[in-house]
Amino acid sequence: MNPGFNCTGQTACMASCGKSKTKPNGKKPPAEEKKQYLEAEFTKVRVVDFDLKELVLLPREIDLNEWLASNTTTFFNLINLQYSTISEFCTGDTCQAMTACNTIYYWYDERGKKTKCTAPQYVDFVMSLVQKLVTEEENFPTKYGKEFPNSFDSLVKKICRYLFHVLAHLYWAHFKETVALDLQGHLNTLYAHFIVFVREFNLVDPKETCIMDDLSEILCAPVPPTPAPAAPSSPNSAPSPSSHNHVTER
Ligand SMILES: [Zn+2]
């Protein structure tokens, strides 16, 4: 059905979540000691503060495949956009491999051959493949009455797995640059929304996402109720702490 769709990026150390791993070239992964993205000053920044779980639930009148197709396409566009904000810093020199935490992702070409590639090449492979899939009518049908293919479920899972790799790389290798652009709120919101979505529909193996569980637990926790204003009678009070909820216009 999909002769050209045998590519599977794979993790180098799927079963060793949480363990320190030395890269094949003998070098220790960088920044092992500190994950800036876990610091409270950054994790508290979001662009929305509503319940993401409610946002991802299948609406009663919507077909499951339609819902998965539309959300997957949206995540693809948003993650592509988020990556594009730092893509000038993700080069063959700065990111010689597609890394995230202690994991290196390898690309598998159409014949299943393992390919060593830089992070920008890997992301390019991901984005080109996903772009192709979501615009192919036989995979992501948009016309009324057109059936979804039998392989649709596995296609969506494959796409979500790749998109997770890109998000993980953004945090691992480009969080500093994201903060410099003041886009960490967007990244956090996108990441949390994506994780809540893939968990709801079981789209990515937890063995795959576990490398980022520390962040997922913080960002996907239910939003604490907003404390009642101290002086409700004062209409022109100072901005509340939740005034991080701005969207930066660029
Ligand atoms: Zn990179």
Image (cartoon, grey):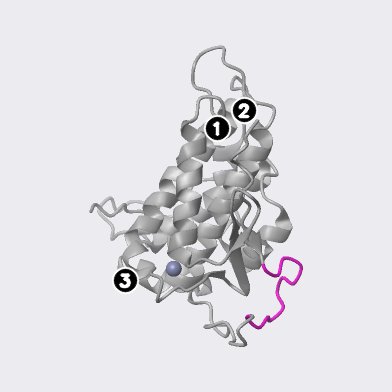
Position of residue 171 relative to residue 21, above or below, is above
Q: Which disc number belongs to residue 69?
A: 1
Q: Is residue 72 left or right of residue 153?
A: left
From the viewer's perspective, is residue 82 above or below residue 202? below
| Residue wearing tag 3 | 180
First in residue order: circle 1 vs circle 3: 1
Disc 1 residue type?
Ala
Residue beneath disc 2? 65
Foreground tag (1 vs 3)? 1
Q: Secondary structure at mark 2?
A: helix
Range of magenta residues: 12-23
Most foreground residue, 46 or 95: 95
Identity of the amino acid at label 3? Ala
Ligand 1 position by quadrant:
bottom left
Check if mark 2's residue and mark 1's residue have beta carbons within 8 Å: yes
Instruction: Decide: few, some or many residues near mark 1? Use Cα within 10 Å; few <14, some 14-19, many ≥20.
Output: many
At horizontal 37% and vertical 51% (from top left) the residue drawn is 81
